Image (tube, helix red, strand yellow):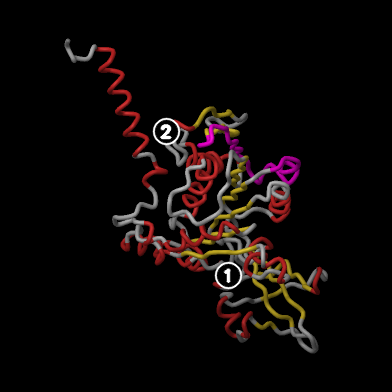
């Protein structure tokens, strides 16, 4: 009896072999290996972020190119598929989940969030989620190649649901439906974030945020770094990572990036510090609006003192010779005074928040 395979059998065997190789080498299987130059022990900040998954709200505030979006995509894939690695110490769900992955606008959601999870427009199926587990994708309207979501096979045999959304859709678009996991890639507006948080109440779900801190001490950032009450601090945690915390960034490329990056952004893009900490700087027309919180000393002539006890001259030096500060336009909650027109040597505008101090 001949053991030779027929042509059809040879083609089937080759197809099976190719599929097996593809599953072994898919992105999800190759990330965070046990050994090698990029072994997971060399990514302690990423592992800290995963391990903190038992906390309701998490922030991974990281420098550019550190792999914060990859960390978000990796964890989302774990929850959607139920394929938790043996070393996983974070949150686990026992069955299929409903997930939102959210980007800034429809284009960045397609080009970043969708690409990380499901593959790019030009290479669908090449994302973090193993392609053989993607049962169906749902096409979005209005933007070529954009997806609204996907159905993903779970290890239990059930189906997890992934929805792709953007902040530009507004707070109301996040109303109504319960979610187990919500991943915000890049910093969300405060109203959208609060609405998303409430979507996880009935599921005892989690919200995780990954971004480079370019918007200063915004309401969302402050909620993590400076929780208003001990009770809120119990449910929030954050992990910071810079270039020094990962092994994959080439030193020559780092120097090139630093040389061409605006000075006020270097700390955020390299060291994961908020732009706020680099000081108040003149803003170009297309630059992000930055905020600086300083103390207002009441009585007599108004003087500005920088945060953390910095002297007037330090504030002036960091602000590149602040020549005029407009009048405060009103008192906000908590006694904060807001100045909206601080002119910086005639180049653009900046916003300063003055905190009233006891006399």
Q: Quadrant of the N terminus?
A: top left
The image quadrant that residue 226 belongs to is: bottom right
Q: Residue at x 64, y 76 (%)?
A: 323
- Mark 1, other Cα within 10 Å: few <14 / some 14–19 / many ≥20: many
Q: Where is residue 216 shown, x and y percent of the image? A: 61, 65
Q: Nearer the viewer, residue 274 or 71?
A: 71
The image quadrant that residue 208 belongs to is: bottom right
CA distance separating discs 1 and 2: 41 Å
Q: Where is residue 8 shown, x and y percent of the image? A: 28, 12
Q: State the residue position of label 1.
A: 281
Q: Where is residue 29 shown, x and y percent of the image? A: 39, 43
Q: Nearer the viewer, mark 1 or mark 2?
A: 2
Asked if the magenta segment contains residue 64, the reply would be no
Q: Are marks 1 and 2 in contact (CB under 8 Å)?
A: no
- Mark 2, other Cα within 10 Å: few <14 / some 14–19 / many ≥20: few
Q: State the residue position of label 2.
A: 123
Q: Left or right of 8: which side holds 65?
A: right
Q: Nearer the viewer, residue 335 or 92?
A: 92
Q: Left or right of 164: which side holds 33?
A: left
Q: Left or right of 15: which side holds 109?
A: right
Q: Quadrant of the C terminus?
A: bottom right
Q: Residue at x 62, y 82 (%)?
A: 308
Q: Where is residue 283 shown, x and y percent of the image? A: 59, 64
Q: Nearer the viewer, residue 307 or 150?
A: 150
Identify the secondary structure beneath mark 1. loop
Q: Residue at x 50, y 57 (%)?
A: 89
Q: Residue at x 55, y 60 (%)?
A: 52
| Numbered tag placed on residue 121 in the rendering | none
Q: Which residues are magenta?
A: 154-178
Asked if the magenta segment contains residue 173, the reply would be yes
Which numbered disc, 1 or 2, marks the residue that appears first in the sequence?
A: 2
Identify the secondary structure beneath mark 2. loop
């Amino acid at each position: 009896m001949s053991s030779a395979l027929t042509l059809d059998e040879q083609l089937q065997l080759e197809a099976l072999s190719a599929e097996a190789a593809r599953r072994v080498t898919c992105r999800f299987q190759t990330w965070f290996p046990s050994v090698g130059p990029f072994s997971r022990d060399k990514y302690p900040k990423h592992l800290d972020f995963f391990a903190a998954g038992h906390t309701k709200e998490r922030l991974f505030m990281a420098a550019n190119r550190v792999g914060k979006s990859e960390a978000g995509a990796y964890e989302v894939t774990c929850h959607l598929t139920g394929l938790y690695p043996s070393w996983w110490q974070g949150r686990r769900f026992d069955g299929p989940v409903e997930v939102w992955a959210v980007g800034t606008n429809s284009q960045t959601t397609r080009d970043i969030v969708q690409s990380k999870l499901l593959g790019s427009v030009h290479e669908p199926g090449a994302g973090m989620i193993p392609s053989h587990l993607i049962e169906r994708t749902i096409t979005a309207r209005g933007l070529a190649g954009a997806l609204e979501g996907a159905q993903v096979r779970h290890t239990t045999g059930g189906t997890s649901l992934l929805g792709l959304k953007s902040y530009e859709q507004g707070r109301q678009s996040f109303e109504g439906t319960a979610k187990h996991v919500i991943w915000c890639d890049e910093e969300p507006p405060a109203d959208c974030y609060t609405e998303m948080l409430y979507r996880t109440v009935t599921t005892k779900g989690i919200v995780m945020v990954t971004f480079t801190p370019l918007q200063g001490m915004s309401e969302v950032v402050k909620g993590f770094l400076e929780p208003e009450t001990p009770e809120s601090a119990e449910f929030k945690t954050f992990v910071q990572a810079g270039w020094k915390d990962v092994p994959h960034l080439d030193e020559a490329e780092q120097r090139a990036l630093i040389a061409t990056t605006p000075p006020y952004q270097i700390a955020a893009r390299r060291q994961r510090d908020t732009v706020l900490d680099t000081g108040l700087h003149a803003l170009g027309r297309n630059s992000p609006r930055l905020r600086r919180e300083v103390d207002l000393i009441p009585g007599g002539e108004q003087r500005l003192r920088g945060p953390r006890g910095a002297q007037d001259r330090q504030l002036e030096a960091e602000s590149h010779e602040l020549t005029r500060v407009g009048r405060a336009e009103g008192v906000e909650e908590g006694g904060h005074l807001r100045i909206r027109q601080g002119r910086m040597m005639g180049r653009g505008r900046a916003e300063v928040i003055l905190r009233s101090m006891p006399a």
